[in-house]
Amino acid sequence: MAQEQEPKKKPNKVIPIILGVILIAGIIFGIKEYIYYGKHIDTDDAQIDADVSPVVARVGGYVDSIFFEENTHVNAGQVLVKIDDRDYKVKLEQAMSAQKGASAGVGVGQSQIIATAANSSSARAQAESAAARLEKANKDYARYANLVKDGSITQQQFDQAKSDRDVAAATYRAAQDQYKAALEQVGTSRNQLTVTNVGVTQRQADVDYAKLQLSYTTITAPSAGITSKKNIQLGQLVQAGQTLFNIVNDNSLYITANFKETQLTNMKNGQKVNIEVDAFPDVELHGEVYNFSPATGAKFSLLPPDNATGNFVKVVQRIPVKIKINADKETMAKLRPGMSVNVSVIYKD
């Protein structure tokens, strides 16, 4: 009896189909990635940054009042902190008193100039009068000198005329000296007034400086934004130059993306950027390339690498790129400096 043949097993077609599907999906994925990266430059080494204004005390003193809470919004020019200003008010009063005294000195100096000018006028009149008397005495002496020769007058009369001439000459010289001294006194008074005016200017500068120091006891917000890192309490003694808190400025958010140097070949200002914030993955943000850092991040580090030792290992460096964010106010209000983001620069349409 013939042996029955075993039925042949049908080939399993599922595995080839699965492999084919995977292959096709891989090809499609590869093509999509090739097309994508042919137009985009991506990095996840990026974060949100902002302009942060430190608020610094410009004068020392005890904190008298605090008018804000940490992490709250403030407006530019809003009064935030008041330092005890009693010492500065006293200094201002002292400066104003000194300024008043100096101003009074100007009036005294002007009176002295008027008085010395009057004295100089009187001395000039006396000098002119002495000159007239000297001229008359000279004429009398010349006339008597002719008369004494022919005996018309006595020798005693001639001697009296000579004596009168000498007295008139001495009087004239004395009057001239007094007039010169009076003129010098006028000049001296004017110089003193100039010095007094300089003193008044200095005292006014002291008043202005005291007012400026007093104004510094009222600390206002340099810009609109959100306060952070509050480092003061009521009654605390602060020193000039001490940072009291910081303000994250409104409308100053931007992205710092650290691209590899090999990624910058086709990148330039104004290119569109797609932005994905890790904290808000469903929010679609856009921006544009604003500018590039003038050096790599390593060059700005505390201990920049030095390849002069000869132990050189080439490492791809990263260049910080600033990206502007184009979003509405509501979206911008959600963002905070330091948040991690992914950015994709579109360098081909």
Image (cartoon, grey):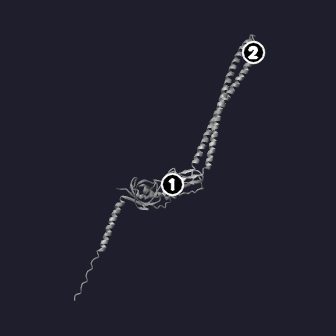
Q: Secondary structure at mark 1?
A: strand
Q: Where, quadrant-wise, is the C terminus in this rendering? A: bottom left
Amino acid at circle 1: Ile
Compare residues 248 and 172 and report the one nearer the observer: 248
**Mark 2 or 1 closer to N-term?**
2
- The mark total stands at 2
Compare residues 293 and 60 and report the one nearer the observer: 60
Is residue 325 visible in the rendered image? The answer is no
Tell me the number on the disc at residue 174. Answer: none
Relative to 204, say whether 233 is above or below. below
* Residue occupying the point 59% across, 48% down: 214
26 relative to 98 in the view: left or right: left
- Mark 1 is surrounded, within 10 Å at the Cα level, by few (under 14), some (14 to 19) or many (20 or more) other residues, namely many
* Residue occupying the point 62% across, 39% down: 200
Q: Secondary structure at mark 2?
A: helix
Q: Where, quadrant-wise, is the N terminus in this rendering? A: bottom left
* Residue occupying the point 77% across, 15% down: 156
* Residue marked by disc 1: 247
Amino acid at circle 2: Phe
Is residue 115 visible in the rendered image? The answer is yes
Q: Quadrant location of residue 124?
A: top right
* Residue occupying the point 58% across, 45% down: 211
x, y (%) of residue 239? 59, 53
x, y (%) of residue 58? 57, 50
9 relative to 230 in the view: left or right: left
Q: Quadrant location of residue 133?
A: top right
The single residue placed furthest to the left in the displayed view is: 1
Tell me the number on the disc at residue 158. Answer: 2
- Distance between mark 2 and mark 1 Cα atoms: 104 Å
* 2 vs 1, front mark: 1
Q: Quadrant location of residue 168?
A: top right
x, y (%) of residue 289? 41, 54
